[in-house]
Image (spheres, grey):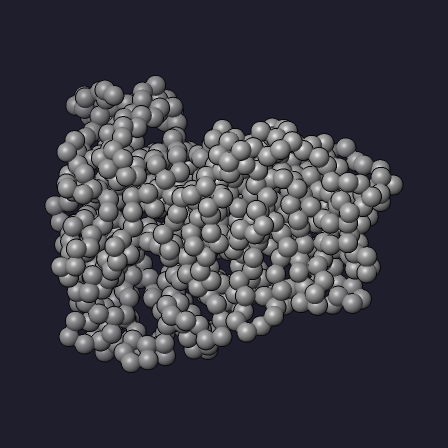
Amino acid sequence: MTALVPVLALLLLTLWAAPSSAAPPAPGAAPADAAPPAAGPAATSPDGTLTLAVSAPGGRLTYSVSRAGTLLVAPSDLGLRLTDGTVLGDGVTVTGHRTRAHDSTWQPVWGADAEVRDRYEELTVDLRQRDGRTFSLVVRAYDDGVAFRYDVPEQPGLRSLSIADEATEFDLTGDPAAWWTPRDDNSDENPWRSTPLSAMGKSNAPVTFRWPDGTHLSVHEADLVDYAAMTVTPEDGSLRAELVPTPGRDAAVVTRAGRALPWRALTVTPGAAGLIESHLLENLNPPCRICGGDTSWIEPVKYVGIWWVMQQDQATWETGPRHGATTARAKRYIDFAAANGIEGLLAEGWNQGWAGDWGDQSFTRPTADFDLREVVSYARERGVEFIMHNETGANVENYEAQLDEAFTLYEDLGVNYVKTGYVGDIPGHNHYDQFMINHYRRVLEAAAEHRINVNCHECVHASGEMRTYPNAISREAVRGQEWDAFSEGNTPEHTLILPFTRGLSGPMDYTPGIMDILWDPQQLGRRVHTTVGKQLAYYVTYFSGLQMAADLPEHYRDAPGLGFIRDVPARWDRTEVLAAEVGDHLVTARRSGREWFTGAMTGEHARTLSYPLAFLGAGEWVAEAYTDAPDADYDTNPTALAVTRTLVTAADTFTADLGRSGGQAVRFRPATRADLATLPRHTP
């Protein structure tokens, strides 16, 4: 616990000069500054490694972050820029502070781990503006990161908050490597970029950084409620949290006082693997609000979809001679799913309203060639969930007007999954402004009332809300695999950046599982930029409560990779990252019940990855491995796959020989007597 500072000393903070520090490291160098002694209250992580210190030199509220005595975030401004021209955080006095320790364990309804430890030290710093207005800065320090938020009480002269923007800054020391995606207030579907911090442009969040000593830091937000989404903007040699505006309005946020605003979160780990293993964002969200009753309807599943055939322009969403979502096609897909242990079917284009002004859709009336009740009944009889598609066409008003009627119908039909979509420009709003943040939450809450899981596409990035609303089963907010069908596609590096950036914010519907890598029915020179082995690795390396087998059923015929897709689950009990480098390679192990699965993948370079099997525990195990064949190459021979079954123990080391943009997926199951008698021993 941080020692309490006498209140009298705190009242003199505004007279203190800013703490001095050594010159910042040269660009590209590891952060070498020793963290100066805290000039004010501080929160320190339970393991003593991370410290966030708060100060108010000259009345300007600032914070700094250090790890193991090394400064990572130099003193950086804090505050809210109000539309009246004032800044909460400029001209402040610290009037008091208090700390508390917290240590608990909670069990997610579903997630990357069956148990999550929530352990931190919390610091609350009380502040008074020169004009008499008051607010608090709430700080938490975890072993894997730090976070802070503004808490503004209702008071005379401040009954509500009209916020033009934030003054919050992140002044990182040195010039670390940065992974960022160009800012777009309406889309997260831009390629991820890799540059030094000094060459970084405006970016959507999260943004990830790495210093040469291996320290990684990712900037994001958590508990995003009734607020505008945060972007990250280079400004005067630092980075600033910039809010997504509402077009034509001075205020990005208008909200009540008497509330805490979203967390600004910095995940900080000694290596890249720790970023993926962190539960910081979930821990910063409130506990589950829908867990007082039955939650058995919240269940991660794999699914197939009448989808890729439209992405490749071999069928249409709208009705006509090439309509994709017909009753007959849906039944064929259901039969394929049931035969292969795939639990769901998505049928895009099932409903009326796609032709003409396709933003005026009905979410209750099917097309003439799609018998909704018959399809749902046919699926249920075969143990397959029907996943309803609600594409709004950016007509949010139309969607909200039908929401209760539609969700009531779905509940009556026994439909527990909905994929929403927001393609197009939303009149009067950005996709990530305050109004739309509130809309996405309204949909999630309404869905929970009707026992519906939501997979939200074209919506805002996740921010850990799956703890509070575990029916937030997945979302897009990513340049996913569909881009391989109608553009130059996704690069091998892009797909290796995602787990350390977008993947940190929450479950991600990337739509993996393409077996016919080179399928190009339009003859446009477009294809998927991976091997089949990497497509299989995605089921383990990419975390999602909905995992798609995205290819056409006929493309899985005689495909050896289908065996892994049959066996791999969507629900996990434990996650360990065994090897990781952003943009380069990743090996992830996940346990489901008694079985373990690993996914290994690489970027644009072929490589051999070896990883220990200590996670397996005692006994003999069968390793069913799906690996790039020796001659596999994503450009020249992407479908070559070697399937092997060998015996291993926890003392063994496993090897993944990967081609360019290649991968390996392995199922580890306890060995039977028959296995012990017939299978060979694994040799690295």
Quadrant of the drawing holding the C terminus: top left
Residue shown at 80% from the left, 41% from the top: 16
Front-most of 580 and 223? 580
Above or below — where is 209 with respect to 251?
Answer: above
Front-most of 131 and 562? 131
Furthest-bottom residue in view?
Answer: 356
Which quarter of the figure has residue 34?
top right
Instruction: Please indicate whether residue 561 sits to the left or right of residue 446 in the image.
Output: left
Above or below — where is 327 with respect to 486?
Answer: below
Residue shown at 77% from the left, 54% from the top: 91
Where residue 600 appears, x then y in whole percent? 31, 35
Where residue 462 appears, x then y in whole percent? 47, 54
Furthest-right residue in view?
Answer: 8
Front-most of 566 and 196? 196
Where residue 49 appears, x then y in whole percent? 61, 30
**Could one spot residue 499 in this view of the protein?**
yes
Which quarter of the figure has residue 452?
bottom left
Where residue 12 appears, x then y in whole percent? 84, 43
Residue shown at 29% from the left, 53% from the top: 481
**Could one spot residue 352 in this view of the protein?**
no
Quadrant of the drawing holding the N terminus: top right
Instruction: Please indicate whether residue 546 sits to the left or right of residue 293 in the image.
Output: left
The total of numbered circles placed on residues is 0
Above or below — where is 110 with respect to 320?
Answer: above
